[in-house]
Amino acid sequence: MNAGHGILGRRLFATMTSTPKRVPIPKHGVDYRNTIVLAPMVRSGECPSRLLALKYGADLVWGPETIDKALIGTTRHVNPITNTIDFTRLSSNGAKNPALSHDQRESIIYRLHPEKEGKRLIYQIGTSNPETAVQAAKLVAPDVAGIDVNAGCPKPFSTLGGMGAALLKTPEKLCRILKALVEEVGEPHEIGISVKIRILDTPEATKDLVTQLCDTGITGLTVHCRTTPMRPRERAIRDQLRMVADVCREAGVACLMNGDVTSRDEALGLMSEFGADGAMIATAAETNPSVFRPKYEGGEAPWDEVVKEYITTALEVENRFGNAKYLLGQMIPGKLPIYKAMTSAKSYTDIVKTLGHEIELGAMAADVDQRLEIGSFEKPKLTKAERKAATKAAAKQAELSKDTPQLVTAAGIKRKADAAQLDMPPDIAQEQAPASVPERASVLSI
Ligand SMILES: Cc1cc2nc3c(=O)[nH]c(=O)nc-3n(C[C@H](O)[C@H](O)[C@H](O)COP(=O)(O)O)c2cc1C
């Protein structure tokens, strides 16, 4: 073509020859383009769920939203039994001084498997403040491929704190958070920062918001195609999707679509129909993570096959039993008698027996039960008076061993931190931590 035909010709020539703009993907980050990913899900997106999604072909996985304040103050441990990295804190269970409490526990606030998911894991943060967001994100940045800000949760526990969907109403604050994360976490650690939003009431308002967000240095944006008041059972609205994808493309930011995407094959069709760079799947993957497997590799697997894989993975990473049981409740069809039997299980041993996998998984289940102190390994509960006495003894021991960094158990036995880590009790307290709250999750409609 002749590029000398006036300004119009030059513009056309420039358009035809220029490569599309792309925000550079940092060295340790990942490009969300051409990916079908597991959505962030409180409770349903814990370590074994993510590992299973990856096994069945998810390209990337999001961890459950974890609030910045829950992560700040945690200690990073490498767990040699499960090969996971655990961010833990001493839980107080209401005690004034948790270090002296008889029932102190190491609560796992966040667990990841560096070898199997590290380079494909995105940490989702709940925050309403640039300083605390940066402080928390710095702790996990070396272990993940990206940090994503949750700006879509409509539940009061999130919005009342100015987090989640409340950030959609304070775009300047959301942009400050993203810019701070880009400059103080993304750049030094060479990982990407992204955001997950919902659509607003009008295309104009959404366009204005997305334009501002794309100007913060983020590498990716997920749009959940529902407005904040919409319930999960209401069909996703895709009217604004092409516009959002276009704004992102113009700015060089990858755009993931979310909302009622149910399989990899469907995702590919929707991406090409609406111009999105990738797609995110939540509830369909919660019920059956094999939705990530393409048809030509077998497509969706039967529930019993997936359930067996899930139990095996949950045992490998010694997942909290309550969480594993909850997930099984999503995967096993509710109308089957086996579902009811599963709900009364008190240990992994019970579960593998109920589901008929005793021969292959029985020994492993018993080992994990023992380490988690559940089922027949559950310790007898202390009476109130015994608890008081044990706390007193622990305080006394702590006073005696002030100079040595040891943990003092209820029985007054001193354990070095390493030993305590190998012998973690069931993580009940995490269920009460803001990072992963079951009663919230059970009514969640983010
Ligand atoms: C159990 C559950 C937990 C969720 N937790 C989160 C979360 O932590 N962060 C978030 O941004 N969205 C969360 N969501 C919303 C999903 O990521 C997703 O946006 C929504 O379910 C729509 O996708 P879907 O139609 O594929 O289910 C959650 C959804 C469910 C069902």
Image: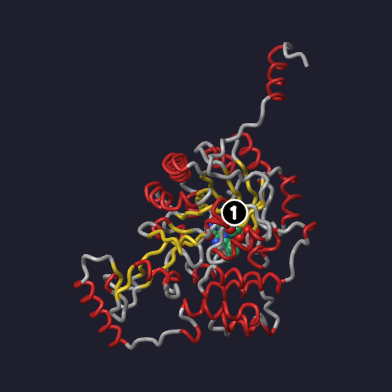
The answer to whether residue 345 shows anywhere in this view is: yes
Left-right relation of 285 to 443: right
158 or 315: which is nearer to us? 315
Query: Ligand 1 shows up in which quadrant of the image?
Result: bottom right
Residue 251, percent from left and from top? 59, 35
Left-right relation of 405 to 432: left
The residue located at (49%, 41%) in the rendering is 190
- Quarter of the picture holding the C terminus: bottom right
Q: Quadrant of residue 303?
A: bottom right
Residue 240, percent from left and from top? 66, 46
Residue 389, percent from left and from top? 25, 84
Relative to 40, say whether 175 is above or below. above
The residue located at (70%, 82%) in the rendering is 336
Q: Quadrant of residue 157?
A: bottom left
Residue 144, percent from left and from top? 51, 51
Left-right relation of 144 to 6: left
Q: Amino acid at mark 1?
A: Thr
Q: Which residue is mark 1?
A: 227
Mark 1 sits near ligand 1, with its Cβ under 8 Å away: no
The residue located at (76%, 54%) in the rendering is 265
- Quarter of the picture holding the N terminus: top right
The answer to whether residue 230 shows anywhere in this view is: no
Relative to 99, say whether 68 is above or below. above
Q: Secondary structure at mark 1?
A: loop
